[in-house]
Image (tube, rainbow, N blue to C red):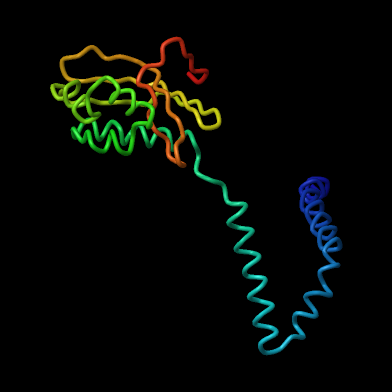
Amino acid sequence: MKKVVHVAGKPFRFIGRLLLRLLRSLRFLAKPFAKLGELRGKARIGAFAAIAVVVVAAVLVLRPGPDDSEQVSETLDRYAEATRDKDYQTICDDLYAEDLVERVRAAGLPCEVALRTGLEDRQNPRLEVLGVEVNDDQALARVRSTAGGEVPSTDLVRLVKEDGDWRVASLSEPGATLQTP
């Protein structure tokens, strides 16, 4: 029985030694904190304010940014919602890349008119994101689209990052492959 207690205590002793070693290595902080404790009045307030600014700045710098794959999926979800709501203005202004809008205009139609012509008769359109692959400011997404009375299709949608936002650059990428299943 004594042996079992000894073995069970090993991890706790290890953690204790590790903490003790950590505290010994932090002794160099004792003098600055002691001096900080000696400060009074405005000097003390200024020192604590400076420390607070440094801590807040460190938190903001070290905070992880939004996940690009998640942002791509959110853009495609907004696209699906705008298509379902027949909100062609939002699609053209907020969700399509400038290059795609310009290509539609070059064909002789304003973007909203082209979308209305192509999508007006779609009933209950849905878009499901199956996978996303991001490479810098470009992304490919495998999507499955369905609509009432139509055969479902699986396509690759190319997105680009413009001014910090993901935009749909192409609704079908022939020859492209997505590594993520």
Q: Is residue 55 above or below residue 32?
A: above
In this view, which residue lies farthest toward the left? Answer: 121
In the image, residue 178 lies at what x, y percent?
49, 17
Q: Say left or right for 78 vs 2.
A: left
Question: Foreground: 176 or 24?
Answer: 176
Identified at 30% across, 26% down, the residue is 127
Residue drawn at (77%, 85%), measured in percent from left and top?
Answer: 38
Q: Residue at x 39, y 33 (%)?
A: 167
Q: Most extreme residue toward the bottom, as rendered?
A: 41
What is the quadrant of residue 51 in the picture?
A: bottom right
Instruction: Please state if 142 lies on the left or on the right of 135 as rendered.
Output: left
The one of 100 and 131 positioned closer to us in this rendering: 100
- State the residue at coordinates (42%, 28%): 159
Residue extending farthest to the top is 175
Which x, y percent locates residue 72?
Answer: 42, 33
Is residue 18 found left or right of 114 in the rendered image?
right
Tell me the quarter of the picture where residue 85 sits: top left
Q: 156 and 165: which one is in front? A: 165
97 in relation to 121, above or below: below
Residue 103 position in % (x across, y down): 33, 23
Image vertical order of residue 10 relative to residue 126, above or below: below
In the rendered picture of this protein, how many numbered marks are placed on residues?
Answer: 0
Q: Nearer the viewer, residue 90 or 127?
A: 90
Residue 7 location (% of width, % of height): 80, 46
